Image: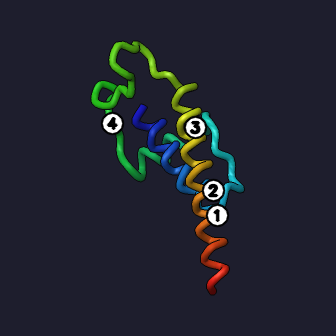
Amino acid sequence: MYYVRMAYELKAEKYVRMHGTTNFSGGGLAQDMIHIWKAYGMVPQEAYPGNAQGDSLPVHGELDAVLNGYVANRNEKQANERSVHNLFH
């Protein structure tokens, strides 16, 4: 789950930076994992399982829903800040 977390973090940053014009969804490419290994290192599954207490497997659908709502809200907030800034400059 460490690699999933890092991939989502990178996607979210890019999505907000590009004003919502890039794809933000679950899934990824094989080279995403290689990029994360090179940039951030490796973490054993035992050290970062990513499961909620009592769950034997991660719940990706819940993760997708929460993160999609978060980045959409952040992108909207950033757009509102830009429009207010443009009123005065």
Name the outermost residue toward the bottom. 89
- Determine whether, in the image, residue 71 is placed left or right of residue 42: right
Q: Nearer the viewer, mark 4 or mark 1?
A: 1
Amino acid type, label 2 = Glu
The numbered dot on residue 43 is 4
Q: Which one is earlier in the sequence, the residue at label 3 or at label 4?
A: 3
Percent from the top left, x then y, of residue 13?
Answer: 53, 55
Q: Which residue is mark 3?
A: 30
Give yes or no for contact between labels 2 and 1 (Cβ–Cβ under 8 Å): yes
Is 2 above or below relative to 9?
above
Amino acid type, label 4 = Val
Question: Residue at horizontal 37%, vertical 22%?
Answer: 52
Amino acid type, label 3 = Ala
Question: Residue at horizontal 35%, vertical 40%?
Answer: 42
Q: Quadrant of residue 55?
A: top left
The numbered dot on residue 79 is 1
Question: Residue at horizontal 56%, vertical 54%?
Answer: 74
Query: How far is the residue under mark 3 from the one under mark 1?
Result: 32 Å
The numbered dot on residue 76 is 2
Amino acid type, label 1 = Ala
The secondary structure type at the circle numbered 3 is helix
The secondary structure type at the circle numbered 2 is helix
Percent from the top left, x then y, of residue 4?
Answer: 48, 36
The secondary structure type at the circle numbered 1 is helix
Q: Nearer the viewer, mark 3 or mark 2?
A: 2
